[in-house]
Amino acid sequence: MSAPVQELTTRARDVFRVVVEQYLDSGAPVGSRTISKLSGLNLSPASIRNVMQDLEEAGLLDHPHTSAGRMPTQTGLRLFVDGMMQAAEPTVEERAVIEGRLATAGPVEEALAAATAALSGLSACAGLVLVPTREVRVRQFAFVPLSPGQALAVLVGDDGSVENRVIALPDGLSADALTEACNYMSARLAGLTLVEAQARIAGELRHEKAALDSASRELIERGLAIWSQDGAARPVLIVRGAANLIDDTAMADLDRVRQLLDEIEGKEAIASLLGSASNASAAKVFIGAENKLFALSGSSVIAAPYHGRDGRVVGVVGVIGPTRLNYARVVPMVDFTAQTLSQRLWRE
């Protein structure tokens, strides 16, 4: 455990703040001579080195073997973010970019994509938006035969979306029974959500109101089950600007970048992390190995919840990047994007 900010001497706080700010700006370890020239602390390089040594022993700074300078540890970054950082409100230009992107977007889905693109461009990170779970209403079902034992289950939503899943066919299912199942589902289930469709099918089969043979019934139940289970388990996550994570400094640590990109591809884990920020009152910061997901890549996530018309949290917006982020600038930017997105959704 590191000492709280209040337990550091004034001199230690000043040196620590300069080291962190210089490191976040340059990405390189910071030497005592650099601090003496830039900080205005009126301390000699020798005095600064002594203070930096004390901060290193306290677990707040690290001393890379290849450099005479120091850089903040993960513990040091957390102390800085929670107790010392002076947040800079988004500039007029940054606000205009965010508000402009969200104002010109069409449907809600486009607004969410615009939010990620705006954050990605302004922060030079990857933008993330966890989309609210939305129950698609069924327009049409279809089963397309693939082989004697498999078919492609096609779901057309009322919003025009089309998704396909491969499904195993019940034994002994004839071509006529497959057609019968398609016709029945489209006629009886159109306009319902998947939950409503399952309830209707269960009721009709229970009371034997469905004039279907056993193979057709099994196919319908199996089809609805695969759609419902898959939809509930699949996180809806929009990612924009992943290429921003591959910059000049990243090229020196390609393994870390590769690991980070792999983590972004694992959307379920990222979605779970973002979901943990849904109860926060403002932007929440996850730094490096504080979360097991980023233990290898050493990445940071800044995320804030956004709200729907009734004031309930419906999703989370944020950015992901290296721990060397300009937290003072990006944290307020994420907060402002979440607030602007909420205002857009309130008007829907």
Image (cartoon, helix red, strand yellow):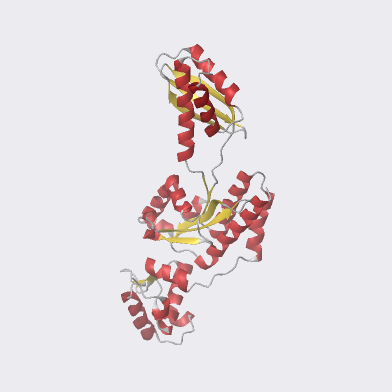
Q: Give the vertical position of 303 relative to 236 (above or below).
A: below
Q: Give the vertical position of 173 relative to 200 (above or below).
A: above
| 282 to the left or right of 251 | right
Residue under the point 38% across and 60% down: 290
How many marks overall? 0
Residue under the point 49% across and 32% down: 227
Q: Give the vertical position of 295 relative to 153 (above or below).
A: below
Quarter of the image with the N terminus is: bottom left
- Occupied quadrant, residue 184: top right
| 194 to the left or right of 340 | left
Pick the front one: 279 or 144: 279
**Residue 244 picture location, percent across and down:** 50, 54
| 295 to the left or right of 210 | left
Pick the front one: 291 or 62: 291
Q: Give the vertical position of 333 relative to 194 (above or below).
A: below
Residue placed farthest to the front in the image?
A: 207
| 24 to the left or right of 314 | left
Residue under the point 62% across and 32% down: 158
Pick the front one: 56 or 27: 56
**Residue 212 picture location, percent across and down:** 50, 15
**Residue 281 picture location, percent across and down:** 53, 61
**Residue 329 picture location, percent across and down:** 54, 66
- Occupied quadrant, residue 254: bottom left
Answer whether residue 293 is visible to the viewer in this image. yes
Answer whether residue 22 is visible to the viewer in this image. no
Pick the front one: 146 or 154: 154
